[in-house]
Image (cartoon, grey):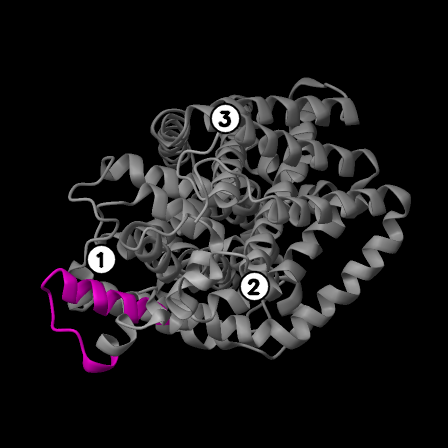
Amino acid sequence: MSKKNEIDWPVMIISGGLLVLFVLASIINVNFVSNIVNVTFGWSVDYFGYFWQVLMVATFFIAIFLAFSRYGQVKLGKKEEPEMGNFKWISIIMCTLLAGGGVFWAAAEPMYHFLSVPTYYNAEAGTAQAVGPALAQSYLHWGFLAWAILGTLSAIVIMYGAYHKGMPLKPRTLLYPMFGESIMKNSVLGTAVDAFSIIAVAAGTIGPIGFLGLQAAYGVNALFGIPNTFLTQFLIIAGLISIASISAVTGVHKGIQILSRFNVVFTLCLILAVLALGPHTFILKSFFNSMGSYATDFLPMSFYNGDTQWLGFWTVFFWGWFIGYGPMMAIFIGRVSRGRTIRQLVTAVAIISPIVTNFWFTVVGGTGIFFELQTPGSVSEALNTGGMPAAMIAIVEQLPIGTFLVAAFLIVTVLFVATTSDSMSYTISMALTGDSNPSSSLRVFWAVTMGAVASVLLLIGGGGIDALQSFIVVTAVPVSIILLPMLWLAPKVSSILAAEQGIETLPKVYKETASSTSFGK
């Protein structure tokens, strides 16, 4: 195990070196990098797309089974009481994942599906018939499956290894129940697991930071006439990274917690404002009807494999993005969830968070669909010409006090991405040291590094950020293999902990594995 705050230099060099190599190659020839990434992206979608679909569904249902069986009573983290209240806890979890998706995807994705109905559905685009399919497809991408892969089974296993067996808070601890302490010391496999997990989450965080620079600069230009130049984009990213660095330095119990709680309260205020000023009846009706469609079509949509090109652009892309976050989110959620039961963990992460997210998508995206139904082109023209930020502005500007609301939406977007940046810089630092309180300098280093990489990619043109977005899916390939054993390791460790806590008698097969080196004994 690592000494406190001792950096794992092989992991640091591999993960940081590959990111630097990606940036340098993009500076030299961004088209060459884009071509390579596109080829590997296509390969990832073709050969791993359906595997990811199965992995996502299996993770969700096994997590639900554990939560609502007797194992749901198991308390995680060797702590009698949680470190923070429910609202603070769920706020941190939600803000860490939503990032830029909290506003720009919420505005744009339902509109994209409304204007071009997903291939699974048979509905006329741009009509009232397309509302349910558009929202249901968005719910799939940001709903139960997406949240479950981020912090249910993997969080249970990481908390077992870290808090019940004394292993470090590193991605390799996910495989501790299989390999024991051998994966912790001088392990090529352990180093590879840590490095791939850090690369995946860094790429998944740098992408939203870069797109925020592009999107927020567009919004500032539309609102205040400030030129949409690289300087504007850079200043926005610099401000975001400053917020993230300060928050990361102060830690989970101060900056990250305060920022997350403020962000959720601010978002709730925006929801109430849009409901009060906008088409509240349409929003509420659409939410309940679309949730019904989502529930009815949940499994067929989840396993749909009829149009691989469409899936690669939408569903499989999202699955790759979320899977890439999986190991590091497990560490982060494990860090903030000590003293929680399995039932509380799964309910918060895989039920409450996705339902709130889906309602938020209905409030923002559903309002856009309402305006588009009333006046065709009022949102779609902006979306087609200016992309996601234009869609958000076009939607919100049609509400009373629209200019004020646009500014508020931009602020909440910056805060969403800042929360993700500070949480992930904090988590990467934990993964490199194995310590739950890594040094402030290391946290700031990673926050600044991710902002700097995003800025450099913006400087060389949009192709660098686009390539990174596709690269996110490529990095999910090894990470998905790391997450696969969670399907059987989480039930095993749940059974062992249930026996330790007097909830059930340990089955004979688990007694044997629990006493063997495979469980670190």
Residue matched to label 2: 189
| Closer to the eye: label 2 or 3 | 2
Q: Can residue 445 be seen in the rendering of this structure? A: yes
Residue 461 located left or right of residue 423: right
Report the number of numbered marks.
3
Q: Main secondary structure of the magenta part?
A: helix
Quadrant of res 147: bottom left
- The answer to whether 237 appears left or right of 59 in the picture is right
Q: Residue at position x 66%, y 74% from top?
A: 308
Q: Check residue 424 for magenta coloring.
A: no
Q: Amino acid at mark 3?
A: Ser
Mark nearer the viewer, 2 or 1: 2
Marks 2/1: CA distance? Answer: 32 Å
Q: Is residue 324 above or below residue 239?
A: below
Mark sitting earlier along the chain (2/3): 2
Pick the residue in front: 168 or 291. Answer: 168
Q: Position of residue 366 (x, y in %)?
A: 47, 48
Residue 404 lies, in percent from the top left, at: 51, 21
The residue indicated by pointer 1 is 343
Region of the chain picked out in magenta, as a range? 489-509
Q: Are marks 2 and 3 in contact (CB under 8 Å)?
A: no
Residue behind mark 3: 440
Residue name at image x 26 percent, y 45 percent: 338
Amino acid type of the residue tagged 1 in the rendering: Arg
Q: Which SS class for mark 1? A: helix
- Indicate yes or no whether the magenta region holds residue 493: yes
Q: Residue 292: x and y, percent?
A: 35, 65
Q: Quadrant of the C terminus?
A: bottom left
Q: Secondary structure at mark 2?
A: helix
Mark 3 and mark 1 residues within 8 Å of each other at the beta carbon: no
